[in-house]
Every structure is written in structure tokens, then in C-alpha cells.
Amino acid sequence: MINKKTERSLAAIAGGGSNAQLPSSCYTDSGYHELELNRFFENSWMAIGFASELPRTGMAKSVDVLGKPVLVTRDDQGKFHVFANICRHRGHILVEGECTNKKLLTCPYHAWSYDLKGNFVVAPFWDGTENSSPTSEEKSSMGLISIAFEIWYDIIFVNLSGKAEAFEKHIQELQIRWHQHRPPSLLNCFSQQSYSLNGNWKLVAENFLDNYHLPWIHPEIGDSIEASLGLEVENQRLSKDIIGCVHPTAGEEKNKIEKPLPCWPDDTRRHPPLSLQQDLFFIFPNTCLVMEGNYLWSMILMPTAVDQTDEKIALYVIGNQAMNHEYALSRSQLADIIYRINDQDSQVIKQLQTGRKMHAASCGIFNSRHDQLGKWFHQRISEMMSGDIGPQHKQSD
């Protein structure tokens, strides 16, 4: 339950008229955290992993999603499926870890088996005799339980409750923005990394949306404070669930690798061209994306406790040429820089979480010049938690 004081604070923030920040209890109270997971994760389209984690047919991978066992498979035709990772007989976990070259998934408890499409195949000694089997009608209702999912820019999104809006509507504004000139078919994943962070998931998201800290925490990002801060940045609220910013000339101010990687096919009608532009967007509740002229950085946040967050990162280059040996060093340099940035952020998040143990953290002050994204983030959290879905703005208030 949410206490009355916190409830009043959330209602004020959701209304948009307050410059207040979320109370510290929203980052430390386990009861509030459980309610947040239910309202904000299980009933939304949350990211759970990357399709590139299953690069071949005949693969299956278990995923812990908010403590719930989920199974992702790729059948013999290359099609993906997502199921509850439990046998239909007695609810035993079906797959642990990752397996390859599979045609059947067999439960270790009583050896009930399923194909990678989730269809029930066989249960030994069904009626007590060898080679006996359920009827076709019985088999049709004995398959694995499907979970609603979509794959977008290699990210696997699921809706555990089945109550979320259509995924096409959820992602519509970013789909319109990216798909024509940044088609996902050109992406090649070249590196993935996992982290465990000592902080509430919201702090990880807020730090991602914070440009203000860049010159002090990540000096390698820019040669000057002005460049690092991105003073030309344009904050954008594409929808109630997609917020971020656009830096029109990020490519000119960031020299991250010695040999530049191939860029997206440029749209000559745009000025400045896409090769120089950086898009940084957060898709509620747990997807972080940095789209630049020559790479994509995707990051998934998965709460594991009120003060713990697991993080998955995937890095992509543009086109097949970028995967050639001539760009091996460039890919390695890019990965090193991004993972170093993430390591630096992990220390910040730990200190932010420790700070939330003080009630005084409830008295945070937003900076009107630099904290618009943070304010929008707090408003969206408050809308969901107070049950008040306020006005949806596309541009800055």
C-alpha cells in the first residue's frame, strides 16, 4: 500500500503543477516497489531480452522476469515464441539456462515433451501402457501457455498480464521516427553485456535521461563542458510512454573511435544529416535507446529488488560491411567506451540509492534548464501510481 503522505505527493506531481520530485520512499519501500512492478511492468510492454541472443534455429532460453520463469524459443523455421517456462503437468520448470539444437523440450520431472512451437508432443505411458498417447483433441489443449510478445529493433517485449494496449500503438511515435531512415534490418549486434546494479530501477532510468552529469562523470564523451552537456539538445515527449532528447550535431562533438564506422544511409533532405544526429529515448517501463549515425546502443532494465536492478546491454553497427575485419578495432573501441561509461554510471547509481535512505532526499530540487526529462519521468511514474493518467504532451511543457 502507498501511505497517505506519499499518495498526496504523487497526486501533486502527476498533476504537473508541482516541481517536486518523487519521495525517497519510492526508491526504498519494498511494499511500494511490489505495487509498482504490478502496475508498471506486468501490465505494460516490458523488454526482457534480445532476439540476437537466439541467433540460430533450435534454441531455447530461460529468462527470469520479475521472479517469474519465462521461456523464449526459436523453432526450426526461425520463428520466435514466448511461453511460461513451466510444464503443463505439474508446473515444473521446463528449461534452465540455454539449450541449442533442440527439437523437443522435455520436462525432467515426468518427461512430458513439447516442440519449440509450444505444442504438446508426448507423455510416456499416458494410460499406463507403452506408446500410449492422449487423443488429438486432448493434445490441442495441452501445449505450453503463450505470453504476448513483440520483437522490435531486436528487443523482445512481453506483456505478462495481456492487458496492455496494442504494441503498435505503444511504440507508434518512435516507429514513425526511425523506421523509414533507420530500418532495423540493417542492424548487426556485435556485443552484449550484463550488469547487476545496486540501485532502484528508476534511478538507472533517470540517470540515463540526465545530460547534466556528463562532463563530470563521463569526460570521454566530449572535449568541452558545452559539448558534453549538449546545450543544443531538444527534449521530446513523443507519447506518454516515450520520452527523450535529440542532439542534432552529436557526431561533430564526439570522436569515439579512430576509424569511423559506416553510417545509416543518409537522407539528403535532412539538415543536419542523420550521420551527425543522436536520438536518446526511454520507452516506459524499462528500455533505453541511444541511436547515433553509425551505431545503436540498447539497454534493458529489470528490477530484481527495491534496491537492485539487472541490466542488459546490446550494441549494434549498421550494415554488413561494419561487421568486416577492417572495422574490428572500431567495434572494440566503441564497446570499450560504452561499457566504461556504464561502469562509471554504476557507481553513481549506488551513491544515489544510498542517498535515498535519508528522508531529506524527498526534498530534491529540479533544475529548470537541465531536468525536464527527469520531471517528465517523475510525472509518468506518479500518474501510474496514483491512478491518474494526466494530459499527454508531445513537446515541452
Image: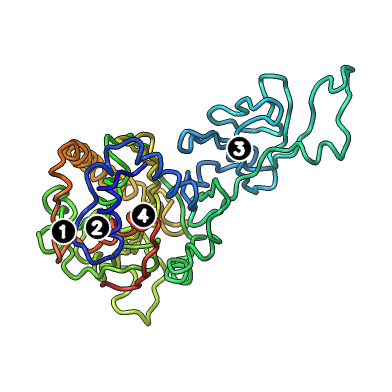
The outermost residue toward the front is 4
Q: What's the amino acid at mark 2?
A: Gly
Residue at the bottom extreme of this rendering: 269
Measure the C-alpha gap from mark 2 to mark 4: 18 Å
Q: Secondary structure at mark 2?
A: helix
Report the amino acid beneath label 3: Ala
Precedes in sequence: disc 2 or disc 1:
1
Report the quarter where the N terminus lies: top left
Counting residues from the N terminus, which is met first, the one under dot 1 or under dot 4?
1
Query: Considering the numbered disc 4 on the image, is that residue within a helix, a strand or a loop?
Result: helix
Residues at marks 1 and 4, CA–CA distance in whole angstroms: 21 Å
First in sequence: mark 2 or mark 3?
Answer: 3
Asked if the residue under mark 1 is in contact with the one under mark 2, i.e. CB atoms within 8 Å, the reply is: yes
Front tag of 2 and 4: 4
* Residue 213 falls left or right of residue 338: left
Secondary structure under tag 3 reads strand
Q: Which mark is residue 55?
A: none
3 and 1 marks in contact (CB < 8 Å) = no
Q: Earlier in the sequence, mark 4 or mark 3?
A: 3
* Gap between marks 3 and 1 measured at Cα: 42 Å
* Residue situated in front as seen by the camera: 53 or 109: 109
The answer to whether residue 102 is above or below residue 367 is above
Which is more N-terminal, label 1 or label 3?
Answer: 3
Residue linked to disc 4: 386
Q: Residues within 10 Å of mark 1 (few under 14, many from 20)?
A: some
Amino acid at dot 4: Ser
Q: Which residue is mark 1?
A: 366
The mark closer to the camera, 3 or 1, is 1
Q: Disc 4, disc 3: CB below 8 Å?
A: no
Residue at which label 3 appears: 84
* Residue annotated with mark 2: 374
Q: Of the residues tagged 4 and 3, which is closer to the observer?
A: 4
